[in-house]
Image: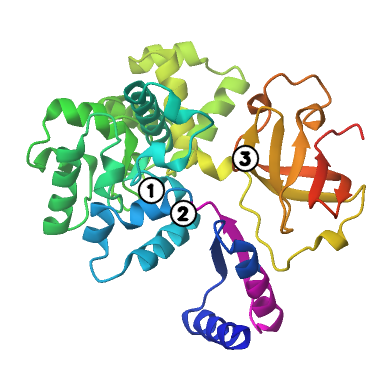
Amino acid sequence: QPDRAKDSLLKTAQRWGVQIIAIGNGTASRETEALVAEVIKIAAFPLKYVMVSEAGASVYSASEAARAEFPDLDATQRGNVSIARRLQDPLAELVKIDPKALGVGLYQHDVDQKRLGEQLGTVVESCVNFVGVDLNTASAALLGYVAGLNSKTAKAVVAHRDENGPFGARKQLLKVKGLGPKAFEQSAGFLRIPEASDPLDNTAVHPESYAAARALLARYGEKHTRLPDVAARVRKLFADKESTPAQLAADLGIGEPTLNDMLDAMARPGRDPRDDAPPPLLRADVLKMEDLQPGMQLRGTVRNVVDFGAFVDIGVKQDGLVHVSELADRFVRNPLDVVQVGDVVDVRVLSIDHARGRIGLSMKKGG
């Protein structure tokens, strides 16, 4: 009963102030997309939708972690929550799933599973530490990937937070049972506290460099000067040749690379490197193959990368193929050198085969 479903979806979105609907890209996703697009047409408020990869969602929904997190929901509802959260913060959600369950590539089951698991774990750990983690909102699953922490200490951090309230400073981590000075030293620089009284606790500056950072702030800032303003002031001194990084680093008793890292961190407190990536594609309507014409310029999301090219979701029922020869204006040996799954790319329609449901695309700029 499509009309009843549309009415129910519209009322739910209106009641809860929904602005974006996340649709899993699995079974019946295109039918769901068409239904949502019809709801958006009749909605009297701003509403968009976005396609989200649901790889591994079923694995998570049946896991012990999901049952502990949502004991009153069934597996389908847990999967729905996982898909919605992937739109909000993909990394925080995907760490709850064994990376092998995400479908990491062709022939993944034919290689040494132990080595594959180790390599994937290293990649996830690298991603988590590169992005940084909010100490007061992160789950135990996410904290467990922070350098210096493990599953046991991550759970201890969450238990301490639940019992004593949010952390107000990084140094309070030392009060967590089972977390010693060494673990603190390794992990502190990757943990952020946006609400901290000390603004340095919301940067990538490590506590062991706080003395130098405070000396820098005392020299180039007043009591309430914002960190980015101090960083900008110091960079201007370098540009005007009034000082040099080497000279200032020597004055502060730190190395020049440490000073540069410190200034970068202070320039953007709470920086999330993912903010620099293209945002997900929000759509309001569904394209049909009949709407496509050769030469049309579209924007899409890379859904899969194979040896012979990349499949791109451009908002029609069938993903289009960018053949390896059309990925760039130069010779491309490996498509992964140009695109990754999840990339938002600009494409041009080359051909439409209605009979076989195939769409040829190009990413070449030269036409």
Q: Residues within 10 Å of mark 2 (few under 14, many from 20)?
A: many
Q: Name which residue lies at 48% across and 30% down.
A: 264
Secondary structure beneath label 3: strand
The amino acid on which the numbered mark 2 sits, given as a three-letter code, is: Arg
Secondary structure beneath label 1: helix
Q: Give the range drawn in magenta.
A: 34-54
Residue 38 part of the magenta-drawn span = yes
Q: Name which residue lies at 66% across and 27% down.
A: 307
Measured Cα–Cα span from mark 2 to mark 3:
18 Å
Quickly name the residue at label 1: 92
Q: Does the residue at mark 1 contact the one at mark 3 (Cβ under 8 Å)?
A: no
Residue 164, position as x, y percentages in the image:
12, 56
Number of labels in the image equals 3
In the image, taking residue 326 as reference, residue 281 lies left or right, namely left
- Ranked by sequence position, the earlier of labels 1 and 2 is 2
Quickly name the residue at label 3: 304
Quickly name the residue at label 2: 86
